[in-house]
Image: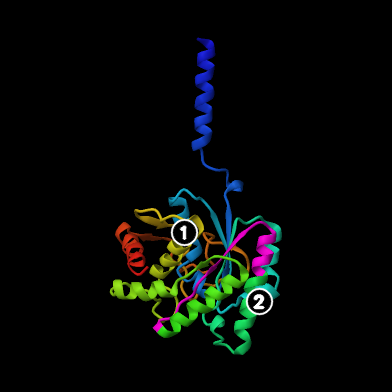
Amino acid sequence: MRLLHLLILFASALCASCTSPMPPDEVPHVLFVGNSLTYVGNTPAVFAALSRRGDHPVVAEMIVEGGATLSQRLKDGSVARALSARKYSTVVLQERGGDLLCSFGPSSCEESRQAIAALTALAKSGGAKVVLLGTYQSMPRISVALVEAESAAAGEAGIPYAEISSKLQVLQKELPETQWFDPDGMHPSSNLALLNALTLFEVLYNTEPPAGTLIVRAPIYGTSSGLTSALTRADAPPPRSDTRLEISYGADEIQSIVSGIKSGS
């Protein structure tokens, strides 16, 4: 009887260890490198909340600055310093909108491709997976060109591409009443930040996002964020006291976006 009792206790201990939360230091860290397209709506925090809901807990950190390019982040060494200080499971790169279309001069697209390749090599040398998160264009013809350019840049670097622009084209038709952009007409709304996170979830985990309501307890940044290029956690207290601190996405809202993406596939 004593032996049986010990075996039961041992089995219970094993079961408890399987279901206990992962220690904070062991939770995978994901680094987002980008600009205002990344932080408006706080795509990193939405992705982290979605990952937790899908049994993939992560800590999201970011190096983001309004109008910044990946070339700048390569040159200033901020990404290299972050990668040397911590082991990241994944690095998500997002370029300034238009750079890969040479919108800022003939050299901007070449510099962007080179930066994506160099940052990818840097991250991979530390054991991280890298993914290029796409940007978007409202005009269909330009959207097609953007997707081609981003896909080519990701292919050259040998990394997955989380495509956004053509999905947004479909969703604007499928869900015409949904607000996709910030009031300025250029930056992402909270719904577009959700689209970014849903797309990243499928690309990184190769499975559909979890159903149900999603609550994101983190700063929901607007265009005036107060953020600089300093490394920060996506859920850290915001620089501005007037920043919204939580957002909730309804189950129907999430499902409508997922269904809209599927209908356009």
Quarter of the image for residue 128 reads bottom right
Classify residue 122 by image quadrant: bottom right
**What residue would you read off at disc 1?**
201
Question: Magenta includes 51?
Answer: no
Q: Which sits earlier in the primary sequence, circle 1 or circle 2?
A: 2
**In the rendered structure, which amino acid carries the disc numbered 1?**
Phe
Q: Position of residue 37 (x, y in %)?
A: 50, 74
Q: Residue at x 45, y 61 (%)?
A: 46
Q: Residues within 10 Å of mark 1 (few under 14, many from 20)?
A: many
Q: Kindly indicate the quadrant of the structure image that contains residue 254.
A: bottom left
What is the number of callouts on the image?
2
Describe the element under mark 1 as helix, strand or loop.
helix
Residue 229 can be seen in this image:
no
Left or right: where 61 falls relative to 83: left
- Please report the residue visible at 51 percent of the width from the left and 70 percent of the height from the top: 38
For label 2, the residue is: 114
- Count neighbours of disc 2 (C-alpha within 10 A) and say few if under 14, some if 14 to 19, many if 20 or more: some
Q: Which residue appears at 58% of the width and 66% of the height?
A: 159
Does the stretch in magenta take in 138? yes
Q: Which residues are the magenta region?
A: 119-140
The answer to whether residue 166 is above or below residue 107 is: above
Quarter holding the C terminus? bottom left
Question: Residue 239: x, y in percent?
Answer: 54, 68
**Where's residue 223, x and y in %?**
48, 76
Q: On screen, 59 above or below 191? A: above
Question: Viewer-proximal residue, 220 or 168?
Answer: 168
